[in-house]
Amino acid sequence: MTSTTEISDRLSKCFSSVIHDVMRDDGFKNFVLNPNIKPNKEKHKIAGQIFTIEGESNTSFSHHETLLAWTGLLSQAPSDKVLICQPNDNNIALMGELSAETLQKKNIRGYIADGGCRDLEFINKINFPVWSKFYTPKDVVAYWKPTKFEETIKIGDVEIHNGDYVMADIDGVVIIPQDKVIDILEKSEKLINTESQVRKAIREGMDPQEAYIKYSVF
C-alpha cells in the first residue's frame, strides 16, 4: 500500500498544469483554486494530504480568546500535511512569523489560506511555503479564531475534504480527491513522460502538428 508520504513526494515532482489536464480529461470540475491565491515565492512547490481549517471573525472576541484558539490550531496541526484555511474573512493575515516557524518545525509541508499573510520577509527567510491572496500587518488578535478542523470547506467553487490531496506551484493550486489520487498521480507521471518525448521531438525538428498526431498531447 502506498503511504501518504510517498504519494505526497511523488506529487511534488509533478506540475499543477499536468494534473489539471489529467483531471480535466477525466471529467472533473471545480478543482482549481482561484488564481488570486499565490505563493510567497515563485519557486515554491508543495504537495501533500490536506488538513482543513475554517474560522470566523467577530469583534467581540477577546485578545486571550483568539490567541488561545490560534495556538491551539498550531498545536493540533499534524506533521507531513498541507494546511488549507477558509477564514471567511478578507481583512487579516492568517499566517505570520512565529506561526510559520512553529509549523516548519512540526514538518508541515505548507500553508494555503483564502485570506492574507504577514511577516513576509521573515517567512521567506526561513523558506516556509505559504499561498495567500494578499499581505497586511493586521492579525487575528481580538478579531478572528479557528472554529472547525478536519471538516469539509469550500474556497470559491472548490469543495475541499479533509484528507484530500493538494499540489501547488507557481501556476496554481489543484485539489485532488483522496480516493482518486493514485490514479491521477499515475496518469500525471505518464503524461509528464509523454510530454518529454514531444519536447524532444520538437527540438529535433518535428512539425508541431505531426508531433500532436503522433503523441496525442501538446
Image (cartoon, rainbow, N blue to C red):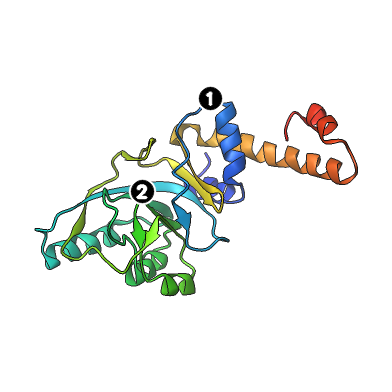
Which sits earlier in the primary sequence, circle 2 or circle 1?
Answer: 1
Image point (31%, 62%), residue name: 93
Q: Residues within 10 Å of mark 2 (few under 14, many from 20)?
A: many
Specify the label residue 146 is tagged with.
none
- In percent of width and height, residue 54 lies at 27, 48
Identify the residue position indicated by label 1 in the image.
Answer: 27
Query: Is the residue 155 above or below the residue 104 in the image?
Result: above
Query: Is the residue 26 above or below the residue 155 in the image?
Result: above
Residue 187 in which image quadrant: top right
Q: Residues within 10 Å of mark 1 (few under 14, many from 20)?
A: few
Relative depth, front residue between 84 and 140: 140
What is the three-letter code of the residue carrying label 1?
A: Gly
Query: Is the residue 75 above or below the residue 3 in the image?
Result: below
In the rendered structure, the answer to whether residue 144 lies left or right of residue 8 reads left
Tell me the CA gap for discs 2 and 1.
25 Å
Residue 159 in which image quadrant: top left
In the rendered structure, the answer to whether residue 46 lies left or right of residue 61 reads right
What is the three-letter code of the residue carrying label 2?
A: Phe
Where the C terminus falls, by quadrant? top right
Relative depth, front residue between 192 and 75: 192
Image point (52%, 39%), residue name: 1
Identify the residue position indicated by label 2 in the image.
Answer: 51
Helix, strand or loop under label 1: loop
